[in-house]
Image: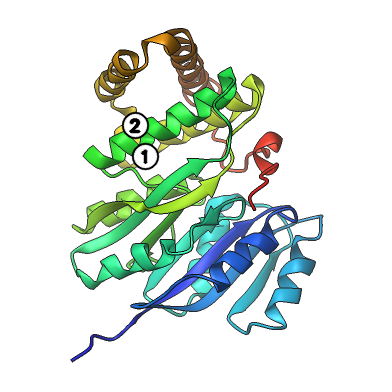
Amino acid sequence: MQSAKIKCSIGIIAYNEEKIIGKLLKSLQEQKLEKVIIDEIIVVSSASTDDTDKIVKSFSEDDDRIKLIVESERNGKSSAINNFIKHSQNEILIIESGDTIPAANTVEKMISAFSDENIGMTGGRPIPENRANNFIGYSVNLLWKLHHKMALISPKLGEMIAFRKIFDEIPIESAVDEASIESQITSAGLQKKYIPEAIIHNKGPETIKDFIKQRRRIATGHIWLKDSTGYKVSSMNSSLLLKLMWEEIVTNPSLIFYLLGTLILEQISRILGWIDYKILKKNPFKWDMVQSTKNMKYK
């Protein structure tokens, strides 16, 4: 007897994504599915001022699975995620950033894993389109490479995640929404699963300023999460990070100066994040866009 297909709802969190939102929706429409049904695609547009809403509406006219929720003001990504959770109709949910593109079989791979009732959350492998032929491009690729290696040891999920709807909301003051969901899934005794074959295309920063801006905000969010819930993501494990960095040096000794430069930028970002949270009492859950990550040229 053939098992029933797994239905899922996909939530796209968007703010001024006119350059990529059409490509993202098209890629979701064209997913290769066997055991999975994409039952609905909900775009939460947080006070977008470009043509994001117009593009989504045009897609919804031809595909009744696509729905648009317009937020009149930006209250942070976590607030938008809660809006999606509230309106979703299925028990298995996907959250995807509006500036990413999944490979053709990513949804199938991420959702079919939920046939195991012990699985509470899955995530794929983000691969940046940045070329590694300059320092920042190398740094972006290195961080996602280390993210991949960490996730193989202890699942660290991001950019596009799937999870069981066992909660109604996450804290709106969280600047690290995926990690906040990880915390709730883990607390419920469910397992996380990293699926490296599920590829998610994204775009990293192109300048040192944007690199630090993005990493600083993430560092602050992780400190907030640890202080407020006790949950610590694997990327905060300094000994594991240094171990993986050393492996990279041994593998690519000619790039040691790029690697050390990346390590310095990451440490600067973490120190600034600590200062923001511990001393300045800042928590950037409503963050400014990192503009250079919005120039994705995915084809």
Instruction: Please tell me whether mark 1 or mark 2 is closer to you in this view.
Output: 2
Q: Which amino acid is tagged 2?
A: Ser
Residue lying at 28% horizontally and 27% vertically, measured from the top left: 237
Q: Which residue is label 1 attached to?
A: 228
Q: What's the CA distance linking mark 1 and mark 2?
A: 18 Å
Nearer-N-terminus badge (1/2): 1
Query: Does residue 134 lie above or below 122 as drawn?
Result: above
Closer to us: 193 or 82: 193
- The spot of residue 158 in percent (x, y) is 43, 47
Residue lying at 46% horizontally and 48% vertically, measured from the top left: 177
Query: Does residue 47 lie above or below 111 as drawn?
Result: above
Which quadrant of the view contains residue 51?
bottom right
Query: What crowding class fits label 2: few (fewer than 14 Cα within 10 Å), some (14-19), or many (20 or more)?
Result: some
Say whether residue 24 is left or right of residue 121. right
Q: Which residue is label 2 attached to?
A: 235
Can residue 230 be seen from the camera position used here? no
Can residue 223 be seen from the camera position used here? yes
Query: What crowding class fits label 1: few (fewer than 14 Cα within 10 Å), some (14-19), or many (20 or more)?
Result: few
Q: Which amino acid is tagged 1?
A: Ser
Residue lying at 35% horizontally and 38% vertically, measured from the top left: 148
Say whether residue 3 is left or right of residue 7. left
Closer to us: 59 or 229: 59
Position of the N terminus, as image quadrant, is: bottom left
Which quadrant of the view contains residue 132?
top right
The secondary element bearing badge 1 is classed as helix
Query: Looking at the rendered structure, which numbered label has been put on residue 242?
Result: none
The secondary element bearing badge 2 is classed as helix
- The spot of residue 33 in percent (x, y) is 41, 75
- The spot of residue 278 in percent (x, y) is 46, 22
